[in-house]
């Protein structure tokens, strides 16, 4: 099978990453907020950190795939697809790109190398690159030639969010923000046209949906139970529609969806920024969500037969019951120190990537939480993420598992 993920902790076999590129150097203070950054990472150091992340994964026997490489393979395997991909990329890049549609399409068609084309679309196209000489246009006489005709996509290294592998299927997402919604284009082409993925992978959600859904809110708890956060970025309606679509698939093993309602804030943007599984009976959690956390069970078979009920029990008891274990331990990010908890959650102390039961990848900067994990018997593999973390995402955010071994 080309994809198969039925848990958060099964031994990781293959995973999708995207190495940060020039799109990070196209961030400027004036656009940071609209592009969802709080600071500007130093690209070369961020690439070094990302390479260390990938190397750690390979050392653990994980096959590392890259988004740009899969996209290039998709174009090379399909004669004539390039033109449609370029047109879609331009149409989704905003009003300015559509206003210069013919000029932008002609410019991108002139880029003959597929990987260079993909990187150019990811990094963005400045006006000065499209119009290298004096055009006489009023916009060029008045405007700053550092303006972008195609804006950059600096969040691409967070491969968790534009789509998510669920069992043997995939959900292609309608992202919460316009700037990130463009990222789904790559997943759309890969899962509809790549020779390895286009026929084998069922699609449980698609980018044309009305309601926003993001991969950081999706956790495969077991082969029969899926958890989805109702968060700042994922709407309740999307969770319900995803459940309907999965239940309508007679071959899907999932028969329960747990909807976790968490506070809707920038700090808690996704469920996996405050809650991740690290072993069969252990989770990391940010204590700041526990007082407001509500859990709902969605069940049923078929698209129309849906039952929803709120679970009036503690998170520990709910998780133990649905995972079929005697008890569950919630390891608090930062421990009992409120300052450490808030600081380390902001720096993705709860955003662990489990690569086997009881073995996780984390940022080394979250030393309080990392020590708590080790004290609980977890094997902790850490790396420096000082620049990567400026984008507000950790190891789980930066990766999308394609295959895990069954538990």
Image (cartoon, rainbow, N blue to C red):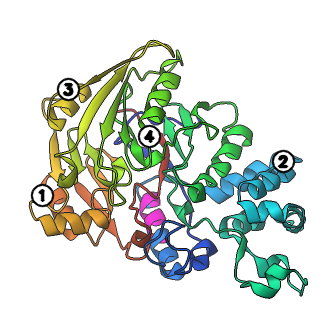
Q: Position of residue 133 (x, y in %)?
A: 89, 86
Residue 18, image quadrant = bottom right
Q: Residue at x 38, y 50 (%)?
A: 270
Q: Is residue 349 left or right of residue 36?
A: left
Please provide the residue range marked out in magenta. Answer: 51-58
For disc 3, the neighbor class at 10 Å (few under 14, some 14 to 19, many from 20) is few
Q: Residue at x 13, y 64 (%)?
A: 338
Mark toward the start of the polypeptide (3 vs 4): 4
Q: Which residue is mark 2?
A: 81
Mark toward the start of the polypeptide (2 vs 1): 2
Mark toward the start of the polypeptide (4 vs 2): 2
Q: Is residue 207 above or below residue 144?
A: above
Secondary element under disc 3, as helix, strand or loop, is: helix
Disc 3 vs disc 1: which is toward the camera? Answer: 3
Disc 3 vs disc 4: which is toward the camera? Answer: 4
For disc 4, the neighbor class at 10 Å (few under 14, some 14 to 19, many from 20) is some
Question: Taking the image as drawn, is residue 322 in sight?
Answer: yes
Q: Position of residue 125 (x, y in %)?
A: 74, 72
Q: Is residue 81 above or below residue 251?
A: below
Q: Residue at x 56, y 67 (%)?
A: 154
Q: Which residue is mark 4?
A: 235
For disc 1, the neighbor class at 10 Å (few under 14, some 14 to 19, many from 20) is few
Secondary element under disc 1, as helix, strand or loop, is: helix
Q: Total label count?
A: 4
Disc 4 vs disc 2: which is toward the camera? Answer: 4
Q: Which residue is mark 1?
A: 375
Residue farthest to the left, as pictured: 336
Q: Quadrant of the N terminus?
A: top right
State yes or no: discs 3 and 1 in contact (Cβ < 8 Å): no
């Amino acid at each position: 099978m080309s994809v198969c993920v039925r848990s958060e902790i099964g031994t990781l076999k293959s995973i999708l990453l995207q190495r940060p590129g020039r799109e990070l150097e196209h961030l400027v203070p004036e656009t940071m907020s609209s592009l969802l950054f709080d600071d500007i990472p130093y690209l070369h150091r961020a690439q070094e950190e990302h390479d260390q992340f990938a190397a750690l994964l390979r050392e653990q026997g994980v096959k590392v795939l890259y988004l740009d490489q899969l996209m290039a393979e998709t174009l090379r395997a399909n004669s004539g697809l390039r033109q449609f991909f370029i047109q879609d990329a331009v149409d989704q890049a905003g009003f300015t790109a559509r206003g210069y549609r013919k000029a932008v399409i002609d410019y991108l068609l002139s880029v003959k190398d597929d990987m260079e084309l993909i990187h150019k679309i990811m990094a963005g196209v400045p006006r000065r690159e499209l119009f290298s000489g004096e055009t006489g246009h009023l916009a060029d006489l008045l405007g700053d030639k550092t303006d972008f005709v195609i804006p950059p996509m600096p969040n691409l290294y967070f491969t968790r969010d534009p789509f998510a592998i669920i069992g043997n299927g995939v959900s292609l997402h309608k992202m919460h923000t316009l700037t990130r919604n463009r990222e789904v284009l790559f997943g759309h082409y890969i899962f509809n046209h790549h020779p390895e993925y286009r026929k084998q992978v069922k699609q449980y959600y698609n980018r044309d949906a009305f309601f926003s859904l993001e991969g950081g809110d999706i956790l495969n708890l077991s082969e029969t139970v899926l958890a989805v956060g109702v968060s700042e970025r994922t709407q309740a309606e999307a969770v319900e529609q995803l459940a309907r679509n999965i239940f309508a698939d007679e071959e899907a093993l999932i028969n329960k969806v747990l909807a976790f309602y968490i506070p809707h804030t920038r700090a808690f943007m996704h469920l996996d920024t405050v809650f991740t599984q690290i072993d069969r009976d252990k989770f990391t959690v940010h204590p700041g969500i526990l007082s407001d956390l509500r859990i709902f069970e969605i069940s049923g078979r078929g698209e129309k037969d849906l039952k929803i009920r709120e679970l009036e029990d503690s998170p520990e008891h709910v998780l133990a019951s649905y995972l079929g274990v005697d008890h569950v331990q919630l390891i608090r990010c930062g421990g009992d120190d409120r300052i450490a908890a808030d600081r380390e959650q902001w720096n993705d102390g709860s955003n662990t990537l489990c690569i086997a039961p009881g073995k996780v990848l984390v940022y080394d900067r979250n030393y309080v939480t990392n020590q708590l994990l080790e004290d609980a018997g977890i094997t902790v593999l850490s790396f420096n993420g000082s620049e990567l973390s400026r984008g507000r995402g950790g190891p789980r955010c930066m990766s999308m598992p394609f295959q895990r071994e069954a538990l």
